[in-house]
Structure formats: structure tokens, C-alpha cells
């Protein structure tokens, strides 16, 4: 994925209740993180750091453009044992800077905080990719995190159409406010698709986030890799979004990044 960085001085389901997500972890040893996969080395998932990425199983939202749909379901067994992941990480001490917990939605897993503590004990920084689905769980782990990449799906009024879940914007907005209040280093980012996000939508969302206090923002143009929606995959993203719009968005933030597939 390439990046250009500019620097200036209808939903039918509800989110599973956070207290119930522990029940979704069946099949893994008690207290053990459910891991769907691991990328041992990445230079793109934590700004300025070489990191390993741990993909946590499970996500209740059903965004059509998701490129990791195989991680949405919490299966009965964990594809990768957390103990094995820790062993690999011990062998990478001195070779990487950080470990990023991604997904899926990592905050769905009640063992996330303990996993982060184990990673910190090895001397690694901790990164987190989240869509802000479970604000309470996010608040619990923020003190253990050095950097957060928070996905903001759309303008708040359009959220349920993207996620397939009723009232999803309330969760996302609470999480955004929590990240900003925490002081943790962060990047807010939005994956955009011409069939889902009009240019006025994009500009309106950018203005909303800037007003909230977001200073670091990225737009990620949809990529078909992993997406199972044929209609979305068939739409061209050439020339999207417009250069004039990008200039307006960039002017709202301290740093702005455009990522292409």
C-alpha cells in the first residue's frame, strides 16, 4: 500500500453487550487470547515502528468492504495458540519495536489486556487497531497502549448502513472521545468507497473529527483484496477522491495521509 503524507503546523442487529463477549471465547484456554493469525514483520501497521501484528478473532459488525471477513467469526478453536505467539515474540526481541493487536475487533476478547501486559513485559511497545465497537473495553486497555489506529467508518448518521448494526455510531463516537481524552498517540482513519462515501460525506466527516480534536487523520481508498462483495469490487476507484477534496481535508489536520491500495 502506498501513502502520500501531507503535514501542516440499514442495520438490523445490535452490538453484543460488552459483558457477553467473554462467552464468545469458547475453545481457547481460559484467559487466553483467541488469535486468528500473525504477521511477524510489518512496517506499515504502527507509524515509525517495525512491528508484529496479532489478528484477534471476532467482530460483530459486517462492513461490506471488510478485507478480513475470515476474522469476523469467533470459531470454537483458536487457529493460533497465544502461547505459541508469545514464544515467537520472545525470539524477536531486539528485531522489532512493537506488537500491534488488530482483527477482527481486538477489544471483543476479554484476554486482550493480559496479552498486552505480557507483550510489554517482553519490552515491546503496544499498538492497537480498533473500530471502537466496545468503548468500555477500549477504555480499560488504553493505559496499556502506546498508539491507537481508530477506524471511523462514516459520518455518524450513516454508520448503521455501513456496519449492519443498530446504534453503532454511539459506540464509535464514545470510543473516539475516549481516545482523544486519553492522550494516547493515535491516528483516526476512514476506509472510503465511491459507492458508500460521497465526497460531501468525506468532507463532512473530516470536519466533524477536526472539531472533536483529531489531529492525525488518514483516508484509505478501498481495496478489493479479501472483500467478498462483488458489487463493491466491481466499482472503479480511479480518480476518487478528487484532488480538491483532498486538499480541503488535509487543511483540517496536523497530518493527513492518503493511502491507496
Image (tube, rainbow, N blue to C red):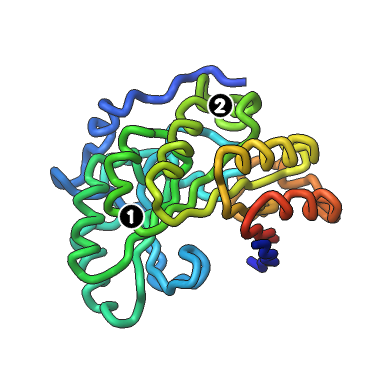
Q: Is residue 247 visible?
A: yes
Q: Is residue 261 visible?
A: no
Residue 233 numbered mark, or none: none
Counting labels gives 2
Q: Which residue is mark 2?
A: 164
Q: Position of residue 87 (x, y in %)?
A: 20, 70
Query: Helix, strand or loop at disc 1?
Result: loop
Tell me which residue sits at (70%, 66%) in the image. 4
> Could you tell whether 247 is left or right of 148 in the image?
right
Tell me which residue sits at (61%, 31%) in the image. 162
Q: Which residue is mark 1?
A: 145
* Marks 2 and 1, the one that precedes in the sequence: 1
Query: Helix, strand or loop at disc 2?
Result: loop
In the rendered view of the protein, which quadrant contains the C terminus? bottom right
Q: Position of residue 77 (x, y in %)?
A: 26, 45
> Could you tell whether 260 is left or right of 138 in the image?
right
Amino acid at each position: 500500500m502506498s501513502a502520500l503524507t501531507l503535514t501542516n503546523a440499514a442495520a438490523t442487529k445490535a452490538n453484543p453487550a460488552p459483558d457477553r463477549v467473554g462467552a464468545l471465547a469458547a475453545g481457547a484456554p481460559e484467559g487466553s487470547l483467541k488469535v486468528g493469525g500473525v504477521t511477524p514483520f510489518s512496517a506499515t501497521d504502527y507509524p515509525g515502528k517495525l512491528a508484529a501484528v496479532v489478528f484477534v478473532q471476532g467482530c460483530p459488525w459486517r462492513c461490506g468492504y471488510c478485507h478480513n471477513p475470515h476474522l469476523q467469526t469467533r470459531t470454537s478453536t483458536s487457529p493460533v495458540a497465544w502461547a505459541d505467539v508469545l514464544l515467537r515474540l520472545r525470539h524477536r526481541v531486539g528485531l522489532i519495536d512493537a506488537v500491534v493487536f488488530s482483527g477482527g475487533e481486538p477489544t471483543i476478547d476479554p484476554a486482550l489486556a493480559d496479552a498486552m501486559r505480557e507483550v510489554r513485559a517482553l519490552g515491546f511497545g503496544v499498538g492497537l487497531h480498533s473500530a471502537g465497537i466496545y468503548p468500555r473495553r477500549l477504555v480499560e486497555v488504553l493505559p496499556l497502549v502506546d498508539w491507537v489506529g481508530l477506524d471511523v467508518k462514516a459520518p455518524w448518521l450513516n454508520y448503521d448502513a455501513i456496519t449492519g448494526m443498530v446504534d453503532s455510531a454511539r459506540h464509535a463516537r464514545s470510543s473516539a472521545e475516549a481516545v482523544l481524552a486519553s492522550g494516547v498517540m493515535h491516528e483516526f482513519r476512514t476506509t472510503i468507497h465511491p459507492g458508500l462515501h460521497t465526497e460531501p460525506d468525506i468532507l463532512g466527516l473530516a470536519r466533524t473529527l477536526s472539531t472533536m480534536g483529531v489531529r492525525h487523520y488518514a483516508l484509505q481508498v478501498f481495496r478489493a483484496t479479501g472483500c467478498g462483495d462483488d458489487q463493491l469490487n466491481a466499482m472503479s476507484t480511479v480518480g476518487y477522491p478528487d484532488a480538491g477534496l483532498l486538499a480541503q481535508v488535509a487543511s483540517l489536520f496536523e497530518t493527513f495521509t492518503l493511502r491507496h491500495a
